[in-house]
Amino acid sequence: MSQASSIFAKLEFAPQREFYFFALYRVLEAGILAGLLYSPLSDVVGVIRAPALAQALTIVYLVFALVMLFLSRRTEWLNRIVFTGVCVDIVVAMLATYAMPKATAGIAMLLLFNVAAAGVLLPMRLGITQATLAAAATLATFVMILLAGQGDERPVAEVIMFAVSYLAVGILASQIGQRARSHAALAEQRSAEVANLVEVNELIIRRMRTGVLVIDAQNHIKLANEAANLLLGESGEDHGHGEGVYLPKAAPELYRRLQRWRHDSKGDDSPMQLAPDQAEVQPRFARLLAGSELSLIFLDDATVVSRRAESLTLAALGRFSASLAHEIRNPLAAINYAVQLLEESRQLADGDRRLLQIIHQQCQRTNSIVESVLGLARRERASPEHVELNPYVRRFVDDYQQSMSIETDSLVAVTGTAPIRALVDPRHLQQVLTVLVQNALNYGRLPGEPARVRVRAFQSEGRPMIDVLDRGPGIPEATAAQLFRPFFTTSEHGTGLGLYIARELCRANQATLEYVTVPGGGSCFRIILPGPHALHDG
């Protein structure tokens, strides 16, 4: 690309409206010349030195001005059009000066605006170039008329003043244009930065986990982010992201709290439920701006707050359990030692010896539970091993039946012949199955009937799984949603930690513990284990 082409390409972004008005001004210039020649006012022009040249020049210039007006809409050619047009303006002005000597001053004044417009609209180098061309053309035309012997009635001082005026106006207009373009470029850059910041802020607000609502004085929702739409439920989704929705209709209780806050500036931040199937939220209210009628409502998911409280509670529990571990192990060690001494007695009957064996096994199990709870509190890593699930499940069921009295209840292992291998810590898996089976025996029974529990090992979609199923009444949906929350229990004697610890142990082994609804009644807790080739990161 040549140097001139580079200069032209620098300012292709110049405003099109200014180019268009400049083209209109050129049409006005051509119209003035044509009107003076072809109207009853032609005497104003005075003596015409070359009538044929003046008439032809006026018609050609008018056509040229109209063509340039049409081409001014081509944004990719704007700078080239301006440069070419002003060059033609200079040539026409010099020819008109020769043809109509009495109108020389007026023609020079008209050209002065064209030179100034070129300086503003074109790059500085081109603008000064055109001013120099106009000054040189003025002087050259004056000299050529004198040399032709036709005489120029203008004084030399006037010609020099017009030439200097072209240069001064061109330089000044070029500097103004350059400054205007730099300011425009800076404004465009700042505008783009502001637009980017607005998009980033909007994205942050929309992706916040905290719901954000902007409410106007008429209680319509002006803005709602994604989290707020989810918390509003169908009321927000049916009206385009919650915007424009009438708040009293979408969330009556939230509207009542907002009105109470507007009245006394004391908001009720107790948890509430905006929709039947949505989580509880804690609303917070604020003014958008001082003196503004717009109100901000922040909706915090109460489950997140409760999980934080649970984490703090569990951390405290971990520290507390660590302090109790020594106290628990001491009596366990004493019981275990006493059992070993009793087992050495030769006077024990076989039934009593079996009872001592059960006591010994339960001491070991209790100690294992203490170790697992402490490991969970310390976030100890699992020690995964390759486990064959079919014999493991059968062995677990046999050990459970021997160590725990299930009376008339039934506990059955359902296994196949094909090998099912998993990568899991056997101690953790035993504790998880113990919790699930114990819960199934306690709660998975119909009134007046014995519990029937099955532990099934199988493989689905390449993932080893274990199901603990019962034939009980099932678990209500409201209860099922909170099964794995710590300290949640429906029993007066339960601690609410069993299923939570079981799930955390599964997570430590990159496994999943979930509740599965059983058609026709009953419950199913499914353990989805990693395969034998899974990579454990602890």
Image (cartoon, grey):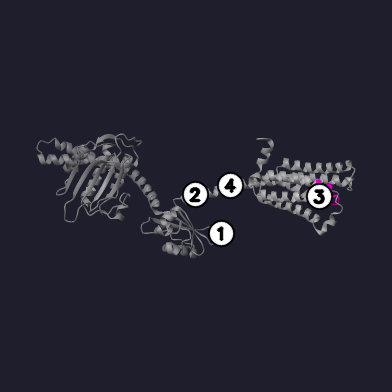
> Which mark is nearer the camera, 4 or 1?
4
* Mark 4 lies on residue: 192
Magenta stretch holds residue 102: yes
Graded by Cα atoms within 10 Å as few (under 14), some (14 to 19) or many (20 or more), the crowding at tag 4 reads few
Numbered circle sitting on residue 203: 2
Earlier in the chain: of badge 2 and badge 1, it is 2
Image: 404 above or below 35: above
Earlier in the chain: of badge 3 and badge 1, it is 3
Earlier in the chain: of badge 4 and badge 1, it is 4
* Mark 3 lies on residue: 54
Image: 426 above or below 408: above
Q: Which quadrant does the N terminus fall into?
A: top right
> Could you say where residue 285 lies in the image, as x and y percent from the top left?
48, 58
Dot 3: element:
helix
Calculate the distance from the C-alpha at mark 3 to the C-alpha at mark 1. Answer: 70 Å
Q: What residue type is labelled 4?
A: Ala
Q: Which amino acid does label 2 sit on?
A: Leu
Magenta stretch holds residue 187: no
The number of callouts visible is 4
Earlier in the chain: of badge 3 and badge 2, it is 3
Calculate the distance from the C-alpha at mark 2 to the C-alpha at mark 1. Answer: 25 Å
First to last magenta residue range:
95-110
Query: Is residue 515 something one can see in this rendering?
Result: yes
Q: Is the magenta stretch mostly helix, strand or loop?
A: helix
- Please name whichever residue, 507 or 402, is drawn nearer the observer in this view of the structure: 507
Dot 1: element:
loop
- For the point 72% across and 41% down, the residue is 126
- Please name whichever residue, 21 or 181, is drawn nearer the observer in this view of the structure: 21
Graded by Cα atoms within 10 Å as few (under 14), some (14 to 19) or many (20 or more), the crowding at tag 1 reads few
- Residue found at the very far front of the displayed protein: 52
Q: Which amino acid does label 3 sit on?
A: Ala
